[in-house]
Image (cartoon, helix red, strand yellow):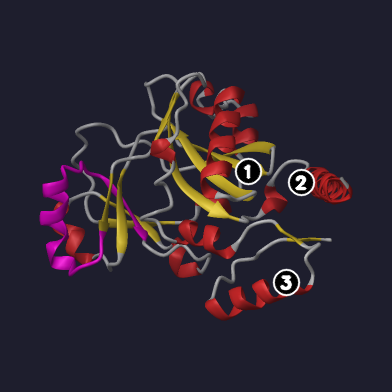
């Protein structure tokens, strides 16, 4: 029997899960609640990305420069200056629990408007990326990529924009980047998928560091910087229905988990006999 942990990570629910595991030791808990918690906090969400060694993976992967703000909104401007962040900035709620509020993001164009924000939040430097985000789904060893429209580039030195501008969830874009590319309205360079070896190394490294099997990453390529990528968000158990071939991927993944579990039990039984 295979069981996966959903978004509920409360102490009471975690204790119930531990009790269930003791009662039914053959059950496989794919992703423990304590590992999921790291992805519910944007302060810790991207921490492991910067620590990965991807020197042989056909590209650079990092995270945008960011600042965590938990105090009074009136001090945000001074904190941004002290941290050396460049505008525009993407403002994201600190808590990423899948609720509508956790997806309420905005783009901030000038420091005078920073006091309008509502902490706690994360301010992330905006990186021009050709208006395309690569939503990379990880299901165990399986990796699938879907292109989605993202925010358009902001020309360097542009001064005709101001204020705090809310923007919708990228994952809810009605029109796919694949359709736009086929229609010839998407820059081919911006739409080119990241190298397979890089995605494989990145997903494998994060699986090991996070201790999770089921998550996705929002990845962007810096415009005009070759194979230079940034992970801007990691989400636990996202909408896998949007992933290509998700039925087969999940079936194969669960079958693999069952086989691994069976082999592990066989080795334990063999050791006990010896």
Where does the image place residue 144, in percent across and percent down from the top left? 67, 37
Residues in magenta?
A: 69-93
Residue at x-position 69% and y-position 38%? 141
Where does the image place residue 264, in percent across and percent down from the top left? 80, 47
Q: Which label is found at residue 22?
A: 3
Q: Residues within 10 Å of mark 2 (few under 14, many from 20)?
A: some
Q: Are marks 3 and 1 in contact (CB under 8 Å)?
A: no
Q: Which of marks 1 and 2 is nearer the N terminus?
A: 1
Return the residue found at the far front: 274
Is 175 on the left-hand or right-hand side of 163?
right
Judging by the rendered image, the residue that carries numbered circle 1 is 137
Where does the image place residue 185, in percent across and percent down from the top left? 54, 29
Q: Which of 249 and 271 is in front in this view?
A: 271
Q: Which of marks 3 and 1 is nearer the N terminus?
A: 3
How far apart are the two marked residues, 3 and 1, measured between alpha carbons? Answer: 31 Å
Residue at x-position 27% and y-position 67%? 119
Q: Which of 51 and 42 is in front in this view?
A: 51
Q: Nearer the viewer, residue 272 or 55?
A: 272
How far apart are the two marked residues, 3 and 2, measured between alpha carbons? Answer: 31 Å
In what element is the residue under mark 2?
A: helix
Q: Do the residues labelled 1 and 2 touch (CB within 8 Å)?
A: yes
Where does the image place residue 60, in percent across and percent down from the top left? 42, 25
How far apart are the two marked residues, 1 and 2, measured between alpha carbons? Answer: 10 Å
Q: Locate residue 84: give its quadrant.
A: top left
Q: Which label is found at residue 183?
A: none
In what element is the residue under mark 1?
A: strand
Judging by the rendered image, the residue that carries numbered circle 2 is 246
Question: Is 218 contained in the magenta span?
Answer: no
Is 129 on the left-hand or right-hand side of 242?
left
């Amino acid at each position: 029997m295979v069981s996966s942990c959903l978004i509920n990570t409360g102490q009471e629910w975690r204790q119930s899960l531990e009790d269930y595991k003791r009662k039914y030791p053959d059950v496989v808990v794919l992703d423990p609640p304590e590992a999921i918690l790291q992805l519910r906090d944007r302060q810790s969400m991207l921490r492991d990305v910067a620590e990965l060694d991807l020197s042989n993976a056909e590209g650079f992967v990092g995270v945008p420069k960011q600042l965590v703000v938990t105090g009074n909104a009136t001090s945000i401007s001074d904190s941004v200056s002290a941290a050396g962040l460049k505008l525009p900035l993407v403002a994201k709620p600190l808590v990423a629990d899948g609720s509508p509020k956790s997806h309420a993001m905005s783009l901030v164009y000038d420091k005078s408007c920073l006091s309008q924000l509502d902490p706690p939040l994360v301010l992330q430097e905006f990186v021009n990326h050709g208006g395309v985000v690569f939503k990379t789904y990880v299901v165990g060893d399986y990796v699938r990529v879907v292109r989605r429209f993202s925010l358009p580039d902001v020309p360097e030195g542009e001064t005709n924009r101001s204020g705090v501008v809310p923007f919708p969830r990228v994952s809810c874009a009605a029109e796919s980047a694949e359709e736009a590319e086929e229609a010839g309205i998407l820059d081919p360079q911006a739409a080119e998928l990241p190298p397979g070896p890089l995605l494989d190394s990145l997903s494998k490294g994060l699986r090991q560091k996070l201790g999770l099997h089921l998550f996705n990453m929002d990845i962007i390529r810096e415009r005009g910087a070759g194979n230079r990528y940034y992970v801007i968000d990691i989400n636990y158990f996202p909408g896998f229905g949007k992933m290509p071939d998700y039925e087969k991927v999940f079936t194969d993944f669960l079958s693999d988990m069952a086989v691994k579990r069976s082999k592990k039990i066989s080795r334990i039984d063999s050791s006990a006999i010896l």
